[in-house]
Amino acid sequence: MDESCIFCLIASGQDKEAEVIKQDLVCFRDICPAAPHHYLVIPRKHIQSCFSLNRRHVNLVERMAQMGKAVLQEQGITDMTDIMLGFHQPPFISVSHLHLHVLAPASQITDFDYKFIPNTPSFVEEHSLRRRIQNFDPDPGANQSHLKLLFQKILPS
């Protein structure tokens, strides 16, 4: 656990104000909601960001999405075509702990102008991230050309 990470404190139960669904994943309401339903799903284990992921994390990302959808359904959201699931990408993250944004209805997102535009340098949709990491080898040396291509896409010259 990273003692300086607010999400690690929430995940460990040390933040008494956060309602936590306990598993190896944790879900809670975003403190600055951009939609009527805005939740964050985080792993209990500290992972810095979506740039820290590789093909071994595909299942984790899938389970984070499943939990987010389940929470929406528990809250009465039935139109799963009007939701957004995604991750902010560095340097556009406010907390350096991997977190999935779960928003509904997506048609009512208030900060859409820049924070939640899908597949931009600042925000990647969950399904796009899964595709991106699916072939990303956990051996750093094997990924040098992959990283170069990834950064060329994210940070065009």
Image: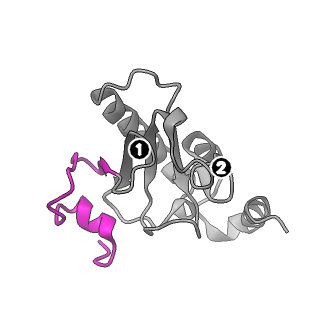
Left or right relative to 19: residue 87: right
In depth, the one of 15 and 145 nearer the eye is 15
In magenta, the rendered stretch is 1-29
- Crowding around mark 2 (Cα neighbors within 10 Å: few <14, some 14 to 19, many 20+) is some
Quarter of the figure with the N terminus: bottom left
Question: Which of the two labelled residues, at mark 1 and mark 2, occupies the earlier sequence position?
Answer: 1
Query: Is residue 140 positioned above or below 131 on the image?
Result: below
Q: What element carries label 1?
A: helix
Q: Does the magenta stretch include residue 45?
A: no
Q: What residue type is labelled 1?
A: Met
Q: Position of residue 117 (x, y in %)?
A: 63, 48
Q: Is mark 2 on a helix, strand or loop?
A: helix
Q: Which label sits on residue 132?
A: 2
* Residue that lies at the very extreme toward the left in this rendered image: 16
The residue that mark 1 highlights is 64
Q: Is residue 21 magenta?
A: yes
Q: Which residue is drawn at 40% across and 33% down?
A: 69
Q: Position of residue 64 (x, y in %)?
A: 41, 44
In depth, the one of 83 and 7 nearer the eye is 83
Q: Position of residue 32 (x, y in %)?
A: 38, 56
In depth, the one of 143 and 86 nearer the eye is 86
Q: Which amino acid does label 2 sit on?
A: Arg
